[in-house]
Amino acid sequence: MLAAIVKAPHHLSVEEVPDPVIGKYDALVKISACSFCNGTDRKLIEGKFPGIATYPFILGHESVGEIVEVGDRVRNYDDGDWVLRPSAVYPKDFLGGLASFWGGFAQLGVVTDYVTQAAEKPHTLPLSGFYPMQQVLAKDVDPVEATTYITLKETLSWLRKVGLETRQSVLIMGSGPVGMAFATCAKLLGGDPVIMSGRRDERLALAHHFCVDYTVNVTKERLAEKTRDFTKGKGVDLAIDAVGDYSLIDEATRAISRGGKIGTYGVPPSDAGSPSLIELNLSHAPGDWTLQFASPDEPSAHREILNLVEHGFLKADKFITHRYPLKEITRGFDVIKRGEALKVVITIE
């Protein structure tokens, strides 16, 4: 089968690799589409993802596909089911010498019936991590649009974890697809106002189509001053680093209200194999505030996002600006690097 391989930092190519082999608790999936995660995938390709120094590997984790074969002990998947996050090879496993982070840019992938395996073979499989996110979609799903559900589920569940309440003000630092998803979900939860900061006027103009009330171009305007204008002097209740840049936390301490929260979502870049470090100057922080490191609980938001899309409250297709076939994946990555794309989906034949 074909898969997108990162052989070394800055070396992305499409090559033939072995087909995955399923076990009795696995299902084989024909992957139809996988979208780029602009932050994580770019850091992985460029060798800047913290703690990752294993090459070569198969890229991609926002994948959607159709089950074409099930193992003997599978009880929670059926032939013909559409599923999220099939992977050619799981993290820390290998396929013909290839690792995976997480292996979604491939023609074939695997999902695992972890519920049945855990019930029949206790203590052999953790009930957390990658497997719970491999959830079933509607039969008539558009697989290209469905690649965006992963980001929407992550951001919605993250906002719930940090405790966003109705009529609380939100500052989203970052105007990429994650930032737009945060804005959309914050408004669904009653955030008011929703403010977005970024560096490009054209992207900030687009933000108003994603439920953003106010924008701040930080190359021209003072973030703290503008956010306080928008919140009548109070400052924001919640500031979100949607990019993965710990320097934004310093900026956020000037913009949050007393008792406000700063949450980190993005993973900051670092040299491969090295941790990300944070340095803070808290001289401008309010007397009472909270810094939160929260992980999304994607499975908890699955049904909600599907219902919101089905009934027209969420328009997943508006996140997608570019589509390319797998053999042209480098073109997709190039438009991300040039800042021309919001969401790039790779279709897999």
Image: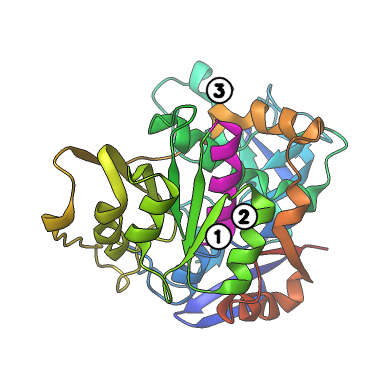
Front in this rendered view, residue 287 or 151: 287
Query: What is the crowding at mark 3: few (fewer than 14 residues within 10 Å), some, or many (at least 20)?
Result: some
Q: Is residue 196 left or right of residue 257?
A: right
Q: Could you tell me how far apart the alpha carbons at marks 3 and 2 are, in whole angstroms?
A: 20 Å
Q: Amino acid at mark 1?
A: Leu
Q: Secondary structure at mark 2?
A: loop
The quarter holding residue 221 reads: bottom left
Residues rendered magenta in the picture: 175-190
Three-letter residue code for mark 3? Val
- Residue in view at x 62 percent, y 52 percent: 62
Residue receiving disc 2: 88
Q: Which label sits in the foreground, 3 or 1? A: 3
**Badge number at residue 115:** 3
Q: Is residue 296 above or below residue 267?
A: above
The kind of residue on which mark 2 rests is Ala
Query: Residue sitting at 48 percent across and 66 percent down?
Result: 198
Q: Position of residue 189 (x, y in %)?
A: 55, 31
